[in-house]
Amino acid sequence: MTFSSSAGLALLKAAACVALLPLAGCSAAAEDTGSAGAGGKGSPVAGTSSGAVGNAPPLQTGGSIPDLGPIDSEPTEPEECKSVLELTIRDFTAMHPDFEAYRGINDAGCGMVAPTIGPDSKPTFVSGLGTMKRVISGDFSNAVFTACAPWDWSPGLVVITSQDTFNQWYRDVEGMNQTFTVPITLLDAGDGTGNVVYDSKAFFPIDDMGFGNTPNQQHNFSFTTEGHVKFEYIKGQKFTFRGDDDLWIYVNGKLALDLGGTHVPIAATLDFDVQAASLGIVPGGNYQMDIFHAERHTSESNFRVETNIRCFEPVPVVR
């Protein structure tokens, strides 16, 4: 087939360009020799600059094309969870009345907070002394929590001043506390059990930080600790804590370990199998665990965690 006019030749070139467009990436625009009125310049294709020599714009087939990402990308693998507890530490001023409030009552503490966690994932204050006494076995150097029991005597003095003062423990309060994030890593216990452990007999994660070390002390006492994680419940799991002072652990929104109050280091074990019914958990389910701790007395600071849960997924903290 032949064409006798330049217009026919241009039409042939345009047809060839369209046919080869997916392979050659050429522009579907005619050459500037096409009729465009005086000056002989064709109108620029929409989306391009007149006279531009750069790469051709992407082919449009009508309407916008959604960006689906690289077609050769591999599916994203879930981030590997680790035996790490991301802790929020709040340093308090010496002005707070709940700190340095030790009354020498190691059995005070059961029932100081509500049995279900609050709507903002914080413990809810119930009593400054506790609705029941804590029963412990062993001596002061090896105290172990055994049960909560009705009071058979009246200690009289409270160890938490009020609901208002307690509400400051795990919330940011300008001028009263300063907040830091401190990760602690649980390491293999090395005893063949498969457990992981973090053990500190001098738990002072914010020395020389915040409001500074406690007057006349070598460390920064008077702080609270908060952590939130998710984990998969597998039969046989346990979580043991030993330390001072207050400690509350909620699982699935229910109080699972209750060591409130200022006291000597006390050990207690959360047995998930034994407590599964009361916590509303079943094997294979994923649940949230909320940990609340306070260091409120300058005699010492112990913090020991041992567990066979080896996979924690951090949960953001409500400030």
Image (tube, grey):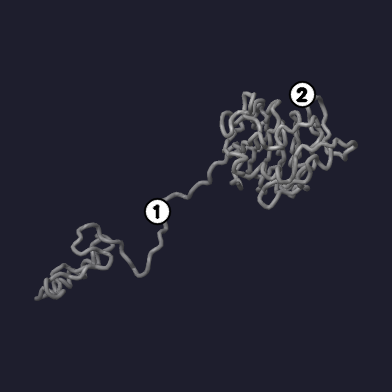
Residue at the image point whose x is 83% and y is 43% from the top: 131
Residue 193: x and y in percent read 68, 30
Figure disc tally = 2
Instruction: Say which of 70 and 116 sits in front.
Output: 116
Closer to us: 105 or 53 = 105
Q: Is residue 275 visible?
A: yes
Q: Position of residue 171 (x, y in %)?
A: 63, 45
Compare residues 316 and 72 and report the one nearer the observer: 316
Near mark 1 (Cα within 10 A), the count class, few <14, some 14-19 or many ≥20, is few
Residue type at mark 2: give it.
Ser
Q: Is residue 209 left or right of residue 101?
A: left
Instruction: Using the rendered image of the protein, determine whether residue 276 is visible from the camera's viewpoint.
Output: no
Residue at image point 69% right, 45% down:
167
- Quarter of the view holding residue 175: top right
User: What residue sits right under mark 1 in the picture?
Assistant: 70
Q: Quadrant of residue 106?
A: top right
Residue positioned 86% across, 39% down in the render = 149
* Most foreground residue, 316 or 105: 105
Residue 127, numbered circle: none
In the displayed image of the protein, which residue is found farthest to the left? 4
Instruction: Please tell me whether mark 1 or mark 2 is closer to you in this view.
Output: 2
Left or right: residue 46 versus residue 151 is left
Mark 1 or mark 2, earlier in chain? 1
Label 2: element kind: loop
Q: Tell me the residue at 68%/40% (across/down).
A: 292
Dot label at residue 141: 2
* Residue 266 x, y percent position in the rendering: 75, 30
> Picture quarter containing residue 64?
bottom left
